[in-house]
């Protein structure tokens, strides 16, 4: 017999987190690769090198590092966004997204603290990096960390649909 | 209580991300027409495949760093070879006490064909005249006394001030709020970029723009 309803709070949180973060990562990667608001659309090489300039503005990496990040991050964001939405291998991918979000958060906090007047570059728009950006990234980091913890807890817990039912205690009469 | 807190965090995160998506519409992609170009403050060929409009402030340290690290190499490798048309736009920030004065002098120098020389002098001596307020002295070092008389008179002219105001208005059209900000134009596309950039990274972008 089913012991509890399968959609408890933890699972609902994971599902919502997957949808929110998966959607954001997918769109962020897509926007960097395609620059959807630009007409006519520029080719991929232009979009990636434009993103490279935004990565460079954080003044964190040498030119080769900037080029590497700019040419890999958008593809990684699309892939991770899709994986989160699908939900396959959630513990692995949510851990990776947590690390990436921690990196983003550290970068925006540093830039904000140093007073760098730069664009965020998050969604390939000329959005200035402000306290709102720091708050947003902090909230998203909190969301993905909590989702990851829940995903690991959920993996350890037995699922009510698949866990073997506990044998009913036998009464003395039955013996 | 815990549940409400967690749901609140999620809602806030979603809202913050949503607010960013909303800003997409403000991107200045449609302002591709290059207007009101003061040829005395532009370098290169207007027919170049890429145009860079640089909104700059003579008193801004980041603009000086951009000028020192990028400008010379950009002019040698892209402007003088006909690949980039470089347009200077004045965007004196209100927080800088002498930015307007410096812009007036630079624009006056442009009228007598000495813009590049005065621009270099102002950036090179930025620290000194920022401290002393002696913009006139910094400009006088590179112009002859006769040229200085003309420049001083022109710097007070309303027509020049109106030209600077037009540049500022143009900046507002692109939501410029910081200097330096560069607007790249190529094949009808417009790429706004705020802040400095490493020359090697800029070069990659320009090569892609030119080659598309």
Image (spheres, coloured by chain):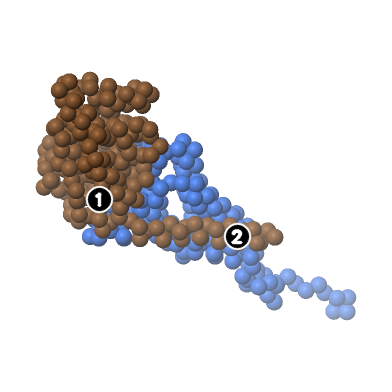
Chain colours: A blue, B brown
Q: Position of residue B99 (x, y in %)?
A: 33, 34
Q: Chain of mark 2?
A: B
**Disc 1 secondary structure class:** helix
Q: Check whether the beta carbons of the residues at disc 2 and disc 1 lie within 8 A of each other.
A: no
Tell me the residue at 31%/60% (across/down).
A37
Sort mark 1 into few (<14), some (14-19) or many (20+) by Cα contacts within 10 Å: many
Residue A46 or residue B195, whichever sits in front: B195
| Residue annotated with mark 1 | A46
Tell me the residue at 60%/65% (across/down).
A11
Residue A6 falls in which quadrant of the image? bottom right
Tell me the residue at 25%/53% (across/down).
B190
C-alpha span from label 2 to label 1: 39 Å
Regarding residue B45, the answer to whether it shows in the image is yes
Q: Quadrant of the N terminus of chain A?
A: bottom right
Q: Residue furthest right?
A: A172
Q: Mark 2 vs mark 1: same chain?
A: no
Q: Position of residue B135 (x, y in %)?
A: 29, 26
Sort mark 2 into few (<14), some (14-19) or many (20+) by Cα contacts within 10 Å: few
Q: Quadrant of the C terminus of chain A?
A: bottom right
Residue A134 or residue B203, whichever sits in front: A134
**Residue B8's mark?**
2
Residue B39 falls in which quadrant of the image? top left
Residue A63 or residue A122, whichever sits in front: A122
Q: Is residue B108 left or right of residue B65?
A: left
Q: Position of residue A68 (x, y in %)?
A: 34, 43
Q: Chain of mark 1?
A: A
Q: Position of residue A131 (x, y in %)?
A: 50, 47
Tell me the residue at 39%/43% (across/down).
A118
**Disc 2 secondary structure class:** helix
Which of labels 2 and 1 is toward the front? 2
């Amino acid at each position: 017999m089913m012991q509890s309803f399968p959609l408890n709070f933890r699972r609902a949180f994971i599902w919502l987190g997957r949808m929110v973060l998966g959607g954001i990562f997918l769109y962020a990667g897509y926007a960097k690769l395609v620059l959807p608001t630009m007409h006519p659309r520029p080719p991929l090489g232009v979009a990636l090198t434009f993103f490279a300039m935004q990565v460079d503005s954080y003044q964190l990496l040498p030119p080769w590092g900037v080029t590497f990040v700019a040419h890999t991050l958008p593809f990684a964001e699309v892939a991770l966004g899709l994986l989160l939405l699908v939900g396959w291998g959630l513990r692995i991918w949510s851990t990776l997204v947590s690390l990436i979000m921690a990196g983003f958060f550290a970068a925006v906090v540093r830039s904000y603290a140093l007073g760098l007047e730069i664009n965020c570059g998050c969604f390939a728009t000329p959005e200035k990096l402000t306290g709102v950006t720091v708050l947003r990234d902090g909230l998203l980091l909190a969301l993905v960390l909590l989702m990851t913890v829940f995903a690991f807890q959920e993996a350890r817990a037995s699922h009510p649909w698949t866990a073997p039912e506990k044998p009913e205690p036998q009464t003395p009469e039955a013996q | 209580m815990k549940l409400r807190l967690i749901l609140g965090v999620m809602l806030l995160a979603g809202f913050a991300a949503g607010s960013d998506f909303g800003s997409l519409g403000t991107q200045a992609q449609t302002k591709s027409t290059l207007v009101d170009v003061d040829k005395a403050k532009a370098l290169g060929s207007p027919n170049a495949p890429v145009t860079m409009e640089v909104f700059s402030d003579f008193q801004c340290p980041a603009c000086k760093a951009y000028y020192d690290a990028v400008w010379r190499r950009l002019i040698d490798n892209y402007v003088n070879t006909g690949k980039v048309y470089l347009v200077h736009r004045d965007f004196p920030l209100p927080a800088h006490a002498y930015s307007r004065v410096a812009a007036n002098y630079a624009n006056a120098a442009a009228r007598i064909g000495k813009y590049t020389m005065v621009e270099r002098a102002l950036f090179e001596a930025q620290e000194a005249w920022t401290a002393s307020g002696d913009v006139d002295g910094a400009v006088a070092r590179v112009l002859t006394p006769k040229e200085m008389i003309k420049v001083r008179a022109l710097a007070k002219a309303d027509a020049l001030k109106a030209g600077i105001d037009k540049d500022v208005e143009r900046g507002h059209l692109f939501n410029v709020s910081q200097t330096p900000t560069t607007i790249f134009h190529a094949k009808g596309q417009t790429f706004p970029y705020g802040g400095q950039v490493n020359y090697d990274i800029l070069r990659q972008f320009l090569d892609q723009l030119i080659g598309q």
